[in-house]
Image: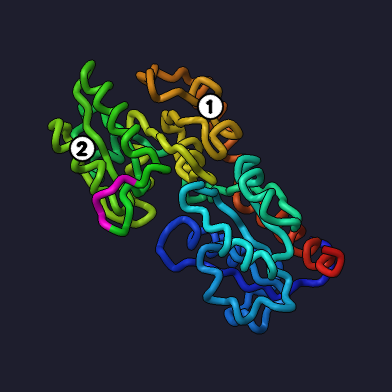
């Protein structure tokens, strides 16, 4: 990083989810000075941008960087976006789809940034040993999904942008050809659990387990599925790929940046094939190139540059 360190406040949602992890990752590694009081900051980074009203009184006169993880058209509140936009100096997005979704509603710069992965936490683990620690059947064909899938408003309705209906359709299709077991993580998994129960598919749900258990859960999978309709990441693509876990994804978020083309699928007519080793190796190499230790200095320079240009924006 060139230039003097800045005082940076990172807004986190405090949901014990990936954005909180990203905030901690950044704060532990940045060369800038992390402050806990937004009033004392030179730069306020709205990493948990949907929580921005928590710090609204402190935004005026600051350099404000806002990360837009993804945009769900049916949930996009244009009026609230425009209220926040008056404070924002620059937007960070992970995909061109997210950039295009907000471009008509702001004149502020929109910069493409990258998700990162901590390769000291997400690395290949022996499948049999992982299953033993988790007390899972060594002979099961295990399909994994660790993303929440149910709306928090009623814990019944599917969170359609995450594609839980697609996930269940694909799992049911696979189960017609072979016996499968589904390993679920995260939270708000009611929709998928109810679907699996209705058709009698074996499943195991570990709600919000610690990171080391999630690592074993990935390692235990014969197949991981990302069936989302809209994504900013998702982080599961980086996590599974960096652990050499066979993963298939719909063409969302960063999938095309990380995965081999044969891992990106149309779920309407899809039964996952076996992946050759060179495919798994290719996605592994792309994932580990996004290591957090190499990307935090890039973010530091970006924050410094945006702060330096604030008067011109």
Disc 1 element: helix
Q: Residues within 10 Å of mark 1 (few under 14, many from 20)?
A: some
Q: Position of residue 170 (x, y in %)?
A: 31, 26
Relative to 189, is 21 above or below? below
Crowd tier of the residue under label 2, counting other residues whose Cα lies within 10 Å: few below 14, some 14–19, many 20 or above: some
Q: Secondary structure at mark 2?
A: helix
**Viewed as shown, does residue 289 lie left or right of 188?**
right
Label disc, if present, on residue 263 of the rendered structure: none
Left or right of 309? Residue 299 is left
The image quadrant of residue 109 is bottom right
Q: Magenta includes 274?
A: no
Picture layout, residue 152 above or below residue 71: below
Instruction: Give me the residue at 67% from left, 83% from top.
Output: 40
* One can see residue 94 in this view: no
| Residue at the outermost front position | 79
Residue name at image x 43 percent, y 30 percent? 247
For residue 264, side relative to residue 154 (left or right): right
Q: Which mark is residue 281?
A: 1
In this view, the residue farthest toward the right is 312
How far separated are the C-alphas under marks 1 and 2? Answer: 34 Å
Indicate the quadrant containing the N terminus: top left, top right, bottom left or bottom right.
Answer: bottom right
Return the x and y of residue 142 as percentages of the image width and height: 27, 31
Which residue was labeled with disc 2?
195
Mark 1 or 2: in front is 2
Q: Give the residues in magenta.
A: 154-158
Q: Earlier in the sequence, mark 1 or mark 2?
A: 2
Q: Residue at x 72, y 52 (%)?
A: 110
Magenta portion: prevailing SS class = loop
């Amino acid at each position: 990083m060139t230039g003097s360190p800045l005082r940076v406040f990172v807004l986190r949602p405090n949901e014990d989810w990936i954005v909180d992890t990203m905030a901690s990752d950044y704060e532990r590694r940045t060369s800038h000075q992390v402050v806990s009081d937004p009033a004392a900051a030179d730069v306020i980074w709205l990493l948990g941008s949907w929580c921005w009203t928590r710090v609204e009184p402190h935004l005026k006169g600051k350099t404000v960087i806002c990360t837009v993880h993804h945009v769900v058209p049916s949930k996009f509140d244009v009026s609230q976006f425009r209220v926040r936009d008056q404070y924002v100096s620059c937007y960070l997005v992970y995909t061109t789809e997210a950039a295009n979704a907000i471009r008509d509603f702001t004149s502020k710069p929109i910069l493409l940034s990258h998700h990162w992965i901590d390769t000291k936490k997400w690395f290949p683990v022996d499948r049999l040993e992982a299953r033993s620690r988790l007390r899972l059947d060594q002979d099961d064909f295990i399909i994994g999904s660790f993303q929440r899938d149910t709306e928090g408003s009623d814990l019944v309705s599917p969170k359609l942008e995450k594609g839980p209906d697609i996930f269940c359709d694909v799992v049911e299709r696979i189960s017609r050809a072979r016996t499968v077991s589904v390993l679920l993580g995260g939270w708000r998994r009611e929709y998928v659990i109810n679907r699996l129960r209705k058709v009698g598919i074996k499943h195991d749900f570990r709600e919000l387990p610690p990171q080391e258990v999630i690592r074993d859960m990935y390692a235990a999978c014969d197949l991981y599925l990302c069936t989302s309709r809209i994504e900013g990441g998702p982080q599961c693509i980086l996590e599974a790929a960096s652990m050499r876990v066979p993963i298939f994804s719909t063409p969302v978020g960063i999938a095309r940046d990380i995965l081999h083309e044969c891992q990106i699928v149309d779920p309407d007519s899809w039964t996952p094939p076996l992946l050759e080793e060179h495919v798994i190796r290719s996605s592994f190499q792309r994932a580990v190139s996004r290591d957090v230790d190499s990307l935090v200095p890039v973010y530091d320079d970006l924050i410094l540059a945006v702060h330096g240009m604030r008067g011109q924006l």
